[in-house]
Amino acid sequence: MIEFWGAFCAGAALLVAAAFLPQLMRALVVAWAWLLTLGLPHDVKERKQGEIESDLWEHSAEARESGYSPLQIAFQQLLRWVLGIPGDLSWRARHIVAGAMRRRSGSPPAVPYVGRVADAVSMSLLSASIGLGVVVFFGAGPDLLLAAVGIGCFFCAVSLVSWVLYHNSKFGRYGLGSRGFRDHDRPGQR
Amino acid sequence: MGVRRKKDDVLPIEASILQAGLELKRRGAGEFHGFLVASEIKEAEGARLLTAYGTLYKALERMEERGWLESRWEDPLIAARERRPQRRLYEVTAAGQAALATAPRPARRVKGEYKLRARGAEV
């Protein structure tokens, strides 16, 4: 009985995730950019997030014009995100080193203490959740049901967090033309 | 241990960006944004995928710090009129052109126009 409900919940979670995959993918990348820039100076954060948001929009718009399905677009964006993770992490590491050098040279810290703690916690949580997903997936062996439940729960958690972050981001307000452009605040452009 | 990168070394991705930027400029687009240059590189090199976000934007920022590119945010009114997010616009500088002139040709899968140029360079 438990196995039945486990499979049912996992299947339902996967179906929901598949239905919202394109939006989920954009939300995931935006959430990643938000996490990656947590605690960094405002101008660095705005630039990184703004560029990613713009790229996602341009990519979706161009791919739709070229006749790609939403699922294909989501897959392309997923690949671009995953393949860029090492570059993103080294970018972040470079900014951490630059911040440490600024502090050592006596300049006031660019990143507030709370920001640094939040940064460390969020990066650890993200790494742990990705690691957990991988362990559940590969460590389940022949027990595919357990793997399915694990993956379902993992994606549910990721989608929930991403969805909240997505709707709180600027990108969530563009709606790819459906709801229009509401604001255009950028540093130095007001 | 890997070989340490010299200050003026141009990485393949940087050479690709500079070359794509100059090609876009030659065709009349003075400035380019991240997705546009990624599309141009994909087309010119015959790649199956666009350059990854992490690779592309890290390279663009590094190149700007080296003075090879200049960037600015697009006029917000243009973005508002076209109902899309504001673009970060880049332009290849004279220093960028000089860096590309001294750089080895991109050694990755070279197809299309870049391939013709590479052949021309070998002849």
Image (cartoon, rainbow, N blue to C red):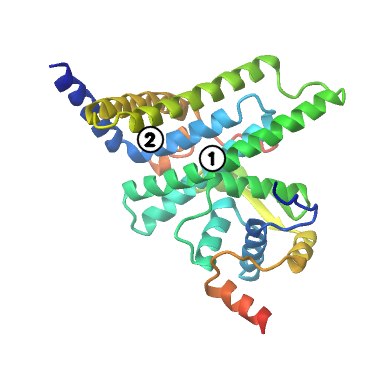
Mark identifier at residue A24: 2
Q: Position of residue B49 (x, y in %)?
A: 46, 56
The residue located at (61%, 70%) in the rendering is: B27
Q: Position of residue A90 (x, y in %)?
A: 64, 38
Residue B99 vs B72, above or below: the answer is below
- Let me know if marks 1 and 2 both belong to one chain: yes
Residue A58 vs A160, above or below: the answer is below
Check the picture and name the quadrant holding the C terminus of chain A: top right
Q: Position of residue A126 (x, y in %)?
A: 49, 26
Residue A78 vs A173, above or below: the answer is below
Check the picture and name the quadrant holding the N terminus of chain A: top left
For badge 2, the amino acid type reads: Leu
For badge 1, the amino acid type reads: Ile
The numbered mark, 1 or 2, whose residue comes first in the sequence reads 2
The residue located at (21%, 30%) in the rendering is: A11
Label 2 resides on the chain identified as A
Secondary structure under badge 2? helix
Q: Tally the numbered discs.
A: 2
Q: Position of residue A61 (x, y in %)?
A: 42, 51
Residue A51 seen in render: yes
A71 to the left or right of B103? left
A16 to the left or right of A38? left
Mark identifier at residue A85: 1
Residue A165 vs B77, above or below: the answer is above
Q: 10 Å neighbourhood of mark 1: few (<14), some, or many (≥20)?
A: some
Q: CA distance from mark 1 to mark 2?
A: 18 Å
The residue located at (84%, 24%) in the rendering is: A104
